[in-house]
Image (tube, rainbow, N blue to C red):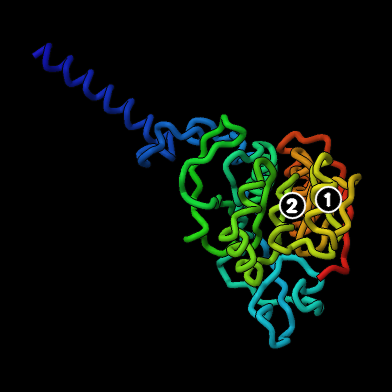
């Protein structure tokens, strides 16, 4: 009897301890949380960063003009980059906050910081980012970082923003199928974004014709030769042509991305992202903004 009483006492104690442990953990019992850093650390970066889930409460649309831009919505007031008409406030879908989608085109041999810097900015701002490449084959960034793209150009969904980056851009510029794909995306893409010699890819697709642009400091002459009608600046951190932003080399992509976040969400949002990244080199409005390009 003594042994049975002792056994029941120990069993009751263990059962009570287990129940209190489960009650103290609101995320317990959810599959996959054993290795979830947020479950163990509720003050991690994801919960501490106030801009982690930015969304757009107001959208802007082009007044009916009979063109394809009638069905396009924008996240910032201004003029329609297609027809030049002043945008008006539209009606957002209730319960479905719009989040800009950004397609990062990645080629084999891409420069790591060219895309990784802007990717950090856009993800921290709450943008939806996915990667695209010529195929879904494994690619390498600077020969050391192995990546598998989310999509190929054959199945990539539309995106609000299409971005190109430097590093081994020659094969991409010479790829007629890729260049045709980029041109086909122009009507359904609101913005284009280039970093470093990614501008040479955009230039080959005709996106930089007659614009003021910039690129990697060692490729200024190359871009000027490739796109004779463009004015290529050598002293600009980035150049904003309303619907396309080109940046200088490598780290300058971070500045261009922060500027773009500032355009869509306001200066405070961009400042918050920069502070979260501990990027203390950012100087707002250090690039060139051209408001008259279409």
Is residue 186 positioned above or below 260 on the image?
Answer: below
Residue at image location 59% in from the left, 72% down from the top: 93
Expressed as whole percent of the image width and height from the top left, the position of residue 239 reads: 84, 54
Q: Residues within 10 Å of mark 1 (few under 14, many from 20)?
A: many
Q: Nearest the camera: 216 or 99?
A: 216
Is residue 226 positioned above or below 249 on the image?
Answer: below
Q: Quadrant of residue 250?
A: top right
Residue at image location 74% in from the left, 58% down from the top: 203
Query: Which comes sooner in the sequence, label 2 or label 1?
Result: 2
Expressed as whole percent of the image width and height from the top left, the position of residue 276 reads: 71, 38
Callout 2–callout 1 Cβ contact below 8 Å: yes
Q: Nearest the camera: 98 or 226?
A: 226
Residue that mark 2 sits on = 199
Residue at image location 75% in from the left, 43% down from the top: 254
Residue that mark 1 sits on = 214
Residue at image location 80% in from the left, 79% down from the top: 85
Q: Confirm whether residue 97 shows in the render.
A: no
Label count reads 2
């Amino acid at each position: 009897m003594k042994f049975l009483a002792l056994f029941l006492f120990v069993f009751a104690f263990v059962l009570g301890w287990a129940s209190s442990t489960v009650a103290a953990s609101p995320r317990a019992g959810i599959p996959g949380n054993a290795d979830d850093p947020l479950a163990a650390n509720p003050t991690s970066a994801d919960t501490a960063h106030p801009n982690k889930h930015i969304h757009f409460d107001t959208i802007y649309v082009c007044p009916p003009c009979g063109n394809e831009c009638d069905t396009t919505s924008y996240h910032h007031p201004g003029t329609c980059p297609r027809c030049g008409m002043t945008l008006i406030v539209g009606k957002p879908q209730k319960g479905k906050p719009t989040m800009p989608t950004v397609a990062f085109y990645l080629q084999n041999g891409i420069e790591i910081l060219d895309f990784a810097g802007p990717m950090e900015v856009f993800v921290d701002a709450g943008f939806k980012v996915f990667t695209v490449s010529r195929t879904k084959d494994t690619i390498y960034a600077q020969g050391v970082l192995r990546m598998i793209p989310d999509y190929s150009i054959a199945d990539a969904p539309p995106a609000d923003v299409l971005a190109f980056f430097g590093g081994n851009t020659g094969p991409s510029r010479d790829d007629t199928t890729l260049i045709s794909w980029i041109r086909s995306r122009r009507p359904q893409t609101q913005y284009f974004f280039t970093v470093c010699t990614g501008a040479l890819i955009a230039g080959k697709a005709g996106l930089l014709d007659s614009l003021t642009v910039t690129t990697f400091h060692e490729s200024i002459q190359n871009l000027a030769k490739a796109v004779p009608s463009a004015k290529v600046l050598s002293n600009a951190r980035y150049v904003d042509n309303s619907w396309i932003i080109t940046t200088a080399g490598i780290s300058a992509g971070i500045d261009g991305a922060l500027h773009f976040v500032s355009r869509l969400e306001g200066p405070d949002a961009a400042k918050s992202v920069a502070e979260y990244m501990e990027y203390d080199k950012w100087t707002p409005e250090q690039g060139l903004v051209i408001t008259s390009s279409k």
